[in-house]
Image (cartoon, rainbow, N blue to C red):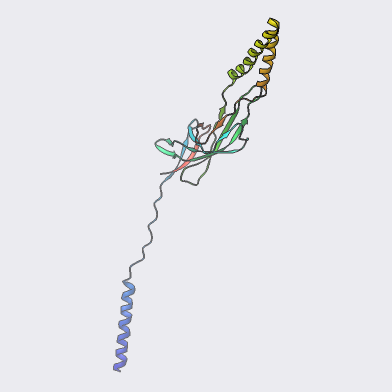
Amino acid sequence: MMKVLARTTVLTAVVLIAGVGVDGAAPVMSEAPVARGVVRQVTIPAGTVLRLRVDRGFGSDISRIEDPVSATLARPIVVGGHTVLREGSLASGYVSQATRPGKVKGRGRVAVRFTRIKPAGRDAHYAMQTRSWVGIAPATKKKDALTIGLPAAGGAVVGGAIGGKKGAGIGALAGGGAGTAAVLTTRGKDVHVSRGALLAVRLTAPLTIAVEE
């Protein structure tokens, strides 16, 4: 009888100790919810100028219509004290015109239009409407005049040596013709926009961006 009581007492003590261990265990704390900023829609008004730095060069002789173009925002866009687009935001678009200069007239011309923008540090993309940026090669009229005029003068000298005033007139026509031929077979200048060039692109429609505060 004494042995039974002793065993009962030992078992009771073990149960009590186990119970104390369970009750005294530290409670599991749930993680506090992560505080998120308030997201609001901010509209960049039409007419705003985006300063974009070209990622890859393009030009009237090396680009084709619809070739992709991309550039990064060189200056942040701030509206009402809120930074809507940070520096480094990525703008993308395409070549809308690529015209080589003609042999008789015309200058090299290239145009690009940007249609989408990805805010820096975010995965969102936004469609946007912009005016085309157009680059035109410088005129070469003065150079063409020299190309025509110099051979004409040389022809006049040669003609004069051959047969007086009449020969000089023939020589001038011959020289002028040679000069004109040189111009007709030589293209004008192309226009190139190199990597790192800064373009000013204007929005033609409002652009609304979700901004987290």
The vertical placement of 106 against 86, above or below, is above
Depth check, front residue: 96 or 149: 149
The vertical placement of 189 against 164, above or below, is below
User: Residue at 33% of width from left, 80% of height from top?
Assistant: 15
User: Picture coordinates of residue 211 (x, y %)?
Assistant: 44, 42
User: Residue at 32% of width from left, 91% of height from top?
Assistant: 4
Of the 4 image quadrants, the one containing the N terminus is bottom left
Residue 109: which quarter of the image?
Answer: top right
Name the residue at the front extreme.
161
Residue 116: which quarter of the image?
Answer: top right
Of the 4 image quadrants, the one containing the C terminus is top left
Can residue 57 be seen here? yes
Q: As drawn, is 185 to the left or to the right of 69?
A: right
Depth check, front residue: 143 or 55: 143
Can residue 132 be seen here? no
Residue 59: which quarter of the image?
Answer: top right
Name the residue at the top extreme.
165
Exactly how many numbered labels are in the figure? 0
User: Residue at 56% of width from left, 28% of height from top?
Assistant: 135
User: Residue at 41% of width from left, 50% of height from top?
Assistant: 36
User: Picture coordinates of residue 9 (x, y %)?
Assistant: 30, 86
User: Picture coordinates of residue 102 (x, y %)?
Assistant: 65, 25
The vertical placement of 35 against 199, above or below, is below
